[in-house]
Image (tube, grey):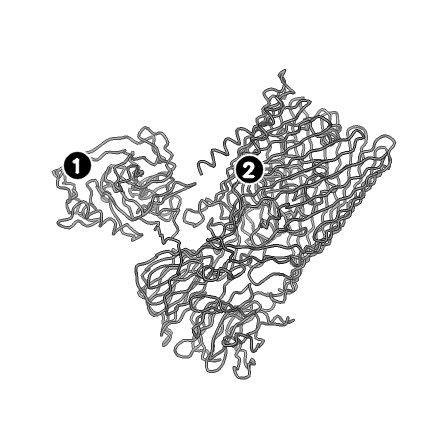
């Protein structure tokens, strides 16, 4: 163990820091430019730069959904139940999925029922930018609720850009792949007036989910104990996503946007593969719809205001008519109304203040027809009030501090401790010693640190689940401490960015299911304490080679311990919590060639590694889960003929056909192929 | 410049590749034999651990009661070629006609094995729950029938034990659980609690000749357990009480919420899981016997089996980690414990004892409790020569053996370290590892004053640890102090006790206070002295409880306050020392104080626990 840790230290020391901000990717530039335009003199830049995947880089990854793309970030643990339709959720720095907030074009995606967002449902095809922030987005001009989560994933969809004289863009794409994957996607951008534009995007996904998997066990002497192959059943999915966006920019300071989203799906829930059970009969229907509007403007050059409004309506229908099980037919309807008003005032050029207030109303209607629960309704009002300030001392030193007050009230009659408003602070510091020195911009070094507290509120399931809920739950508290060193060097020949961070998190009052009394009467209790120590290291490199070749490499590595320290008498005291690997990492290498005509050809290779971990609290051989690692390869070409663009991409995933599981008893697909053809006008 | 960065990239990448450990072939879970007791009894015991739904972790363990060896995952070792092992959620196990039958609920099968648990075949039964036998037939209750049913009634299946085929099926009530055969009739309780508007409270009676349900008898809400006693009466545990029935006639009601029941001879043992007590009732007059086993150290008492020479009770812990099987003698004394799989729920005794042949796993078993006491040298005090008792002719080694008998192996006795500087040195049957978090607990007799956690009886002892560097098995190596919360206030000193100075006797303790096994007339102790913490609160002399890092300072119920982290170790000049393991632990009384009328403050030791070993 000691040896292993010293290796990690060497690694951490040798691999400094994250990509520093302003330069790099043109698409980010475009995006940032747009935001900067709106509030030109404001301190909009993050003091701590998020991990980012954007634009072309994102499109070239061997990834179908946002969840697949997040495997390439450090400090993230993915739970994947396998296949196109399998649930995919993430943890940021081992703190649990419910501490992670996911934002779609700046507004949080909610799930008041179980607090988790299935990231497998979000397509990459219309995604322009994925950012992961540890702690919080370190820009004080944000909605109050954004100060509330421990880890944040921002998803930003493509925005329309028109060159002079252009009135419309059309994008049509078709993807085929293994397991009968068919995935057409059409996008249209229309410039209605100089300031007003419209985007439409529609996508259909079908897969029969019938992939082969294999279970093999050997005896200690190496001879085969059993070796069996079967086809995954009931893993089919049918999903349609449609989106509509209206963007209006006026003056130079203001804009409004309206975004409507609708996702409908029907899928089988393939279930755990256990002895004598090779198929399950559960079906799931979902409809997620929301409309959100953003309006932003600036007054007197110093005061910026942003208003967000959202209405979401999510319906889930779960049926289990497996003849071997007790039947179930449940329907859930969640509704959410959200309102946010954020204001930022620039007191001096070096000092900003912001205040924001958010309100959200959630309802859940539950009908479990067979078990006799009908029209059960729960609701919750949440208020967030935030105040934040930012100092920028000649770019050398930037400081931000925020305070968030959260007040949650449940439906009347439910006494709940969480009604006491909670106050959580966050402090962010960034030091850039060479920012004005003559060696910049050749070198850029920044040292960042933050401390943050955040609460994860009990979900409706935690509070009210039949026979299991506990209305007296307190919110779970996470305290994060993090230090990061980021280094960047860019010349005409190369662009290198390294970063390393160390973090220490402590999660207390962790909400866990605990058996009480007779038989299996589980209840939710604030019982757990988890201590997390980790190191993230990243390297992002581009080499501009002769002959218009560019070589890019992206390396990520995470080492972390997440130890249960609840009670020394437990058999799992001091053990790593379930499904958190000690080691994980990824490597992406890409060779891109640009022809004289401007066509692109490229080859991309990626490797993902997730180390050994345990499926349950106790780190015993019976709970051991093997490491998994996949090699993915893709080849692409991109041609431009006058104003028409054509793109082709072939991906081979899990090249060596590893039989692996991310979650025990949920086998993942072996080698599989996807082909994409895209047409652009 | 260019190449330097390329080298760096290459170095990073190769480092990355060397860091990870590769996949290996998944080896079928090895069977681990553990010697848990020297006690010899007849035959063997199968323990079916349920495992959580979807985890495929049903596990069949076997205990050889003649050799005292406990084998984890016995089925896996006997049937390594069985695809995906035993299955998902083991729900019942019984022996009948020279075969072993196990019901695996979520694998929807009845597993039929020989007595050594070698698989013969399986019979597919959807959502099967419990077993009963009669003549050449096995009966299995199931939550669903072979055909989907709009009323969601369960079924009982009849299986021919010769052909191992289903012969008949009969619909009963909602979610039928335990069943039994009496007077050519099959009784099955319909537990029906899973569906809100269809709670069941009946027992179905099935005529074995026609295999039809002839009666439904109301037996109270959600009945789950059903057993027959030696009087031919049915014992039914429902949600609220235990009913004893003579067919449909109520004989008596025992007002106890019993989660499990086991009848042996004329005693019915009822498990009150909520209050953690095992009660015994007579099957003749239904009176509560004075016998009871207090299960308060259990987290969740679950499996239960009473036999004519022992009672086995399993602790399911938090249901998602391994459990512990406890064996009690019939007079309620704990004999041994063994670590089981997840949710040890179902037990069955067989008359033959087996060993696993070809098992190459060495039998190792460490206990988490004190094994050896190496030294015992108390300061003069009122309990010296009493705790433990000195007898004429005892020497220092004999006193150490007496200390071992008192506090070794979780015996629960007490050793007093006497006045300031008095010490004891003990160890386990293995080195204690210094892992993340707390490593050991040391138990004493401290307690809080009623209603306070600030004041109480605290007789703090300083804890020292040592590594057997010269590997001679004797604590003659360097000592490191575990730095306590008052470390900065400690004063290092020494003190000589003399036989002549043994004049401090108080009216309650009139024996000599000088250790009688010491031949010399004086001995010198050295160490650190803590400032007095005594104060008077509400007329009582009490002590301010110290923050952390001292033995006999906080009550044993405080699992953190009595725990120590070996990372607290410092050397003689106060520098932290990184220890990976320790072999010896020493505790000495660190206060020097005599109070009226309670006498001097002396550290007492009741035991110690290695937190990294699970018994």
Circle 1 SS class:
strand
For the residue pair B129 and B450, the one nearer the viewer reads as: B129
x, y percent for residue A669: 64, 51
x, y percent for residue B468: 30, 39
In the rendered view, does B201 fall on the left or right side of B456? right
Circle 2 SS class:
helix
Report the disc number at residue B523.
Answer: 1
Alpha carbons under labels 2 and 1: distance apart = 62 Å
Mark toward the start of the polypeptide (2 vs 1): 2
The answer to whether any part of residue B601 appears in the image is no
For the residue pair B384 and A33, the one nearer the viewer reads as: A33
The answer to whether any part of residue A56 appears in the image is yes
x, y percent for residue B11: 56, 30
| Image vertical order of residue A199 relative to residue A544, above or below | below
For the residue pair B584 and B247, the one nearer the viewer reads as: B584
x, y percent for residue B208: 52, 81
Which residue is the site of mark 2?
Answer: B17
Name the chain letter of the residue that bears numbered label 1: B
Front tag of 2 and 1: 2
Whether the residues at callouts 2 and 1 have beta carbons within 8 Å, the answer is no
Q: Residues within 10 Å of mark 2 (few under 14, many from 20)?
A: some
In the rendered view, does B496 fall on the left or right side of A479? left
| Image vertical order of residue A53 relative to residue B327, above or below | above
Dividing the picture into quadrants, the one containing residue B144 is bottom right
Report the disc number at residue A241.
Answer: none
């Amino acid at each position: 163990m000691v040896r292993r840790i010293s290796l990690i230290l060497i690694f951490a020391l040798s691999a400094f820091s994250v990509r520093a901000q302003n330069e790099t990717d043109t698409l980010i530039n475009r995006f940032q430019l747009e935001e900067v335009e709106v509030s030109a003199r404001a301190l909009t830049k993050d003091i701590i730069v998020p991990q980012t995947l954007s634009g072309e880089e994102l499109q070239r990854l061997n990834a179908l959904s946002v969840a697949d793309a997040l495997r390439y970030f450090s400090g993230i643990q993915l739970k994947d139940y396998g296949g196109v339709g399998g649930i995919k959720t993430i943890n940021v720095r081992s703190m649990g999925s419910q501490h992670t907030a996911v934002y779609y074009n700046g507004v949080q995606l909610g799930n008041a029922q179980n607090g988790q967002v299935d990231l497998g449902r979000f397509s990459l095809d219309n995604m322009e930018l994925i950012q992961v922030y540890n702690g919080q987005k370190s820009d004080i001009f944000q909605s109050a609720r954004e100060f509330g989560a421990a880890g944040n994933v921002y998803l930003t969809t493509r925005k329309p850009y028109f060159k002079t004289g252009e009135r419309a863009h059309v994008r049509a794409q078709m993807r085929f792949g293994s397991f009968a994957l068919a995935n057409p996607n059409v996008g249209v951008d229309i410039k209605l007036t100089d300031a007003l534009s419209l985007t439409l995007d529609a996508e259909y996904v079908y897969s029969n989910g019938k992939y082969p998997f294999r279970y093999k066990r050997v005896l200690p002497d190496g001879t085969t104990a059993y070796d069996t192959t079967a086809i995954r059943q009931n893993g089919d999915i049918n999903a349609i996503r449609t989106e509509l966006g209206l963007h209006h920019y006026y003056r130079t300071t203001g804009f409004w946007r309206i975004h409507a989203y609708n996702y409908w799906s029907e899928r089988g829930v393939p279930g755990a593969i256990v002895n004598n059970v090779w198929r399950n009969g559960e079906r799931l229907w979902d409809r997620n719809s929301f409309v959100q509007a953003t309006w932003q403007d600036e007054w007197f050059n110093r005061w910026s205001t942003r208003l967000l409004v959202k209405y979401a309506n999510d319906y889930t229908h779960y049926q289990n008519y497996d003849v071997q099980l007790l039947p179930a037919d449940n329907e859930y309807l969640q509704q959410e109304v959200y309102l946010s008003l954020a204001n930022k005032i620039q007191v001096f050029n070096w000092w900003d203040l912001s205040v924001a207030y958010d309100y959200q109303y959630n309802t859940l209607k539950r009908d479990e027809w067979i078990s006799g629960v009908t029209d059960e309704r729960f609701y919750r009002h949440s208020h967030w009030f935030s105040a934040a300030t930012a100092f920028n001392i000649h770019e050398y030193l930037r400081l931000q501090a925020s305070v968030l007050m959260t007040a949650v009230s449940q439906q009347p009659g439910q006494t709940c401790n969480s009604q006491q408003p909670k106050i959580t602070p966050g402090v962010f510091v960034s030091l850039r010693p060479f920012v004005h020195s003559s060696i910049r911009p050749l070198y850029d070094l920044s040292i960042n640190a933050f401390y943050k507290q955040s609460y994860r509120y009990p979900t409706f399931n935690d509070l009210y689940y039949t026979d299991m809920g506990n209305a007296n739950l307190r919110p779970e508290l996470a305290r994060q401490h993090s230090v990061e060193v980021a280094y960047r060097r860019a010349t005409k020949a190369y662009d290198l960015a390294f970063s390393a961070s160390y973090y220490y998190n402590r999660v207390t009052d962790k909400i866990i299911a605990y058996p009480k009394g007779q038989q299996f009467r589980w209840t939710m209790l604030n019982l757990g304490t988890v201590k997390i120590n980790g190191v993230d290291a990243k390297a992002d490199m581009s080499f501009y080679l002769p002959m218009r070749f560019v070589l890019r490499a992206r390396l990520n590595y995470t080492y972390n311990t997440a130890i249960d320290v609840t009670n020394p008498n437990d058999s799992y005291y001091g053990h790593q919590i379930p499904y958190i690997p000690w080691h994980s990492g990824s490597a992406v290498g890409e060779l891109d060639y640009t022809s004289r005509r401007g066509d692109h050809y490229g080859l991309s290779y990626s490797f993902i590694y997730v180390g050994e971990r345990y499926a349950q609290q106790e780190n015993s051989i019976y709970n051991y889960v093997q490491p998994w690692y996949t090699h993915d390869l893709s080849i692409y070409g991109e041609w431009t003929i006058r104003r028409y663009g054509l793109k082709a991409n072939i991906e081979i995933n899990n090249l060596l056909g590893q039989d692996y599981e991310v979650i025990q008893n949920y086998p993942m697909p072996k080698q599989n192929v996807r082909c994409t053809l895209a047409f652009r006008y | 410049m260019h190449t330097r960065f390329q080298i760096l990239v290459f170095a990073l990448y190769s480092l990355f590749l060397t860091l990870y450990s590769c996949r290996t072939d998944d080896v079928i879970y090895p069977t681990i034999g553990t010697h848990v007791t020297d006690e010899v009894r007849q035959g063997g015991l199968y323990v079916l651990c349920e495992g959580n739904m979807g985890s495929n972790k049903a596990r069949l363990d076997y205990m050889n009661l003649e050799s005292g060896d406990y084998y984890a995952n016995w089925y896996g070792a006997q049937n390594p070629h069985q695809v995906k092992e035993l299955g998902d959620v083991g729900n019942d196990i019984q022996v009948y006609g020279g075969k072993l039958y196990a019901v695996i609920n979520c694998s929807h099968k009845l597993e039929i094995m020989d007595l050594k648990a070698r698989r013969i075949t399986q019979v597919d039964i959807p959502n099967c729950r419990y077993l009963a036998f009669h003549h050449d037939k096995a009966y299995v209750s199931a939550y669903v029938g072979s055909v989907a049913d709009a009323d969601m009634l369960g079924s009982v299946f009849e299986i021919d034990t010769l052909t191992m085929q289903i012969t008949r099926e009969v619909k009963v009530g909602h979610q039928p659980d335990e069943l039994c055969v009496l007077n050519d009739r099959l009784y099955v309780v319909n537990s029906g609690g899973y569906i809100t508007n269809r709670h069941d409270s009946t027992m179905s009676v099935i005529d074995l000749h026609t295999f039809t349900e002839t009666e439904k008898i109301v037996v109270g809400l959600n009945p789950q357990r059903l057993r027959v006693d030696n009087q031919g009466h049915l014992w039914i545990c429902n949600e609220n009480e235990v009913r004893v029935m003579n067919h449909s006639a109520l004989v008596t009601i025992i007002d106890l919420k019993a989660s499990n029941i086991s009848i042996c001879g004329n005693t019915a043992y009822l498990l009150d899981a909520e209050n953690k007590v095992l009660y015994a009732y007579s099957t003749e007059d239904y009176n509560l016997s004075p016998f009871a086993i207090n299960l308060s150290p259990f987290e969740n008492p679950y499996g239960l089996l009473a036999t004519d020479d022992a009672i086995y009770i399993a602790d399911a812990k938090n249901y998602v980690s391994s459990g512990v099987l406890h064996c009690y003698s019939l007079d309620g004394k704990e004999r041994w414990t063994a670590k089981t799989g997840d949710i040890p729920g179902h037990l069955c005794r067989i008359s033959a004892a087996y060993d696993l042949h070809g098992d190459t796993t060495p039998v190792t078993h460490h206990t988490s409790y004190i094994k050896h006491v190496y030294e015992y040298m108390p300061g003069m005090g009122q309990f010296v020569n009493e705790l433990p008792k000195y007898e004429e002719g005892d020497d220092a080694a004999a006193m150490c053996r007496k200390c071992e008998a008192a506090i070794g192996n979780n015996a629960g006795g007490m050793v007093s370290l006497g006045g300031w500087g008095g010490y004891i040195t003990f160890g386990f049957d293995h080195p204690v590892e210094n892992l993340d978090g707390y490593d050991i607990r040391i138990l004493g007799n401290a307690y809080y004053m009623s209603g306070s956690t600030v004041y109480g009886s605290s007789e703090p002892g300083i804890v020292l640890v040592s590594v057997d560097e010269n590997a001679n098995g004797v604590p003659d190596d360097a000592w490191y102090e575990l730095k306590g919360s008052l470390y900065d206030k400690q004063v290092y000193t020494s003190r000589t006790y003399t036989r002549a100075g043994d004049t401090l006797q108080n009216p309650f303790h009139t024996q000599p206070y000088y250790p009688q096994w010491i031949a010399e007339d004086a001995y010198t102790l050295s160490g650190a002295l803590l400032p007095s913490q005594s104060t008077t609160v509400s007329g009582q002399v009490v002590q301010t409880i110290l923050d952390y890092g001292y033995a006999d300072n906080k009550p044993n119920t405080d699992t953190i306050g009595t725990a120590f982290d070996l990372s607290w170790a410092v050397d003689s000049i106060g520098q932290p020392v990184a220890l990976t393991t320790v072999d010896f632990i020493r505790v000495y009384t660190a206060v020097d104080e005599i109070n009226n009328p309670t006498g001097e403050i002396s550290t007492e030791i009741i035991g110690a626990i290695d937190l990294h070993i699970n018994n």
